[in-house]
Image (cartoon, coloured by chain):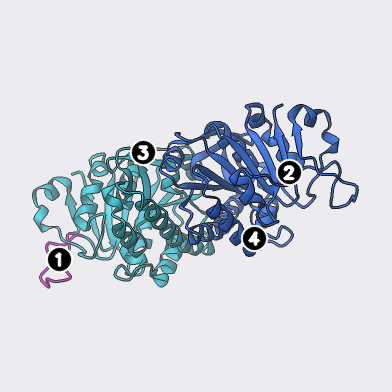
Chain colours: A blue, B cyan
């Protein structure tokens, strides 16, 4: 790959109403599409989460626990279908803002083993990025060689893509400003951490708080944990609040922005 | 794969109005989804064409000729987007008829070389079929290691899938009853050929006539040519008219049906 790509994650919490099944947040999707278009990043891969499109159906059919009963097969089909519907809204928005976006379906090119990515077909992705296309992937219900099927979180995907394609950095767009010393939603004395090393993170895990909404793939702490293998390879992670205008834009442009930088240190 | 799959092709000519850009034929899509559901085939892969969703945009940006100018990149993105929209309608219809369908995007798992499939990631597909899911693929704009990008026809895909997965048979749902001695749309004396061997086909090519509508991937003769490698491997091909009720159903059930059987002989 000629230019090291930036991997941008748009969390399911912002692009959907996570408490209401199958409800997109179209206003935020449109704004983020515009920010991505305006930032004109030369090499970009976008990953989005499932929010209220993926989690509710996946939970209903216990997909994260793997295959145990034929009645779950329809749940796999339905979870997958719901995720493609959300992705479809994201794609429409990106393309209408003149981003040359192309969806890459994880379930078409990834097989997991016991809930971790076992193999990912990379050839189409490499060519897309080299050609100036913006691949868009998402958390998805995928096949698992041990469990039958599994839920691939957008966060596991972000780390895998960043490692496989030697990303320059990862930008995680969430619904909070970054990492706090306490949960900012319940504790007023919470203070934003603007920069933290992996070492500091590992020794102060109890200080990292985040969203508490339903998420079959883990909350903020889960997200950070999932990113550790990339950070260990010197890929800088920047957590920003995607629900606030221009945060993602500034992050993509490399400008100063409110957020938390996590690096190996 | 435990049971040899049937590969069913639904041509773009029937599921869309091929003369009007981006116009689906929802009535036929719904009926075909119902016939697929009722037939209850134990191992099935579905491929659909692009019809008026793929061809017009692909032609406009000269995608079949490969990459020559950066202005085509948006055309790749748009063609792809149009195809996912058509696929989305097919998926909705199949799932609403209780078919456990899962889309597999060719552009996510196929790379072509000079317009022919060079590599296809098969692991997810194999697992889907084994699990009782019905993978649905379609003609798509994909990356090409020589040409930059190329159009993968549903027909090339059908042959590749049939060969790779050792299909028991291929059912091609078109907009004519099968192969005729002359073009039935312009010649009243045309007679349907109910069974033909590959040898007979090769020596009497001038007798095979079919649809004349715009198709960047070739008309009926092109379709049959594309299937030859599968027929040579003893995979029987059955051409039926998908615009007429119950033809696809009977073909899937293995019942007697008006159509043309092509076999190695």
Q: Name the residue under label 3.
A: B164
Q: Is mark 4 on a helix, strand or loop?
A: helix
- Rendered residue at 12%/47% (across/down): B202
Part of the protein shown in magenta: B179-193
In space, the residues marked 3 and 4 are separated at their CA atoms by 43 Å
Q: Is the magenta stretch mostly helix, strand or loop?
A: loop
Residues marked 3 and 4, same chain? no
Chain ID for label 2?
A
Number of numbered discs on residues: 4
Q: What element carries label 2?
A: loop
Q: Mark 4 points at which residue?
A: A28
Instruction: Give residue B183's mark.
Output: 1
Residues marked 1 and 3, same chain? yes
In space, the residues marked 2 and 3 are separated at their CA atoms by 38 Å
- Disc 3 crowd rating (10 Å Cα; few below 14, some 14-19, many 20+) is few
Image quarter where the N terminus of chain A lies is: top left
Q: Is mark 1 on a helix, strand or loop?
A: loop
A68 vs A164, left or right, is right
Image quarter where the C terminus of chain A lies is: top right
In space, the residues marked 4 and 2 are separated at their CA atoms by 22 Å
In space, the residues marked 4 and 1 are separated at their CA atoms by 54 Å
Q: Which of B3 and B53 is in front in this view?
A: B53
Q: Is mark 3 on a helix, strand or loop?
A: helix
- Please name which of the two marks, 4 or 1, marks the residue nearer to the observer: 4
Q: Mark 2 points at which residue?
A: A218
| Mark 4 / mark 2, whichever is N-terminal | 4
Q: Where is residue A43 in the image (x, y as percent from the top left)?
A: 50, 42
Residues marked 2 and 3, same chain? no
């Amino acid at each position: 790959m000629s230019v090291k790509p930036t991997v941008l994650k748009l969390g399911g919490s912002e692009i959907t109403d996570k408490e209401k099944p199958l409800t997109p947040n179209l206003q935020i999707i449109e704004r983020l599409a515009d920010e991505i278009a305006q930032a004109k990043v030369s090499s970009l891969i976008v990953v989005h989460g499932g929010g209220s499109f993926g989690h509710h159906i996946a939970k209903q059919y216990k997909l994260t626990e793997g295959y145990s009963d034929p009645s779950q097969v329809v749940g796999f089909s339905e979870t997958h279908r719901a995720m493609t519907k959300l992705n479809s809204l994201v794609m429409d928005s990106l393309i209408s803002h003149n981003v040359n976006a192309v969806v890459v379906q994880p379930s078409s090119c990834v097989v997991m083993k016991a809930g971790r990515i076992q193999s990912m077909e990379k050839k189409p992705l490499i060519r897309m990025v080299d050609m100036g296309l913006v691949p868009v992937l998402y958390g998805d219900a995928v096949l698992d060689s041990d469990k039958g099927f599994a839920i691939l979180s957008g966060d596991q995907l972000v780390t895998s893509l960043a490692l496989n394609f030697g990303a320059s950095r990862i930008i995680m767009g969430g619904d909070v400003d970054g990492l706090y010393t306490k949960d900012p939603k319940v504790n007023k004395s919470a203070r934003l951490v603007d920069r933290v090393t992996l070492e500091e993170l590992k020794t102060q895990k109890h200080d990292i708080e985040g969203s508490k909404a339903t998420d079959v793939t883990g909350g903020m702490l889960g997200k950070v944990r999932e990113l550790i293998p990339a950070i260990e390879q010197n890929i800088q992670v920047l957590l920003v609040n995607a629900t606030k205008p221009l945060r993602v834009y500034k992050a993509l442009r490399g400008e100063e922005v409110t957020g938390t930088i996590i690096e190996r240190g």
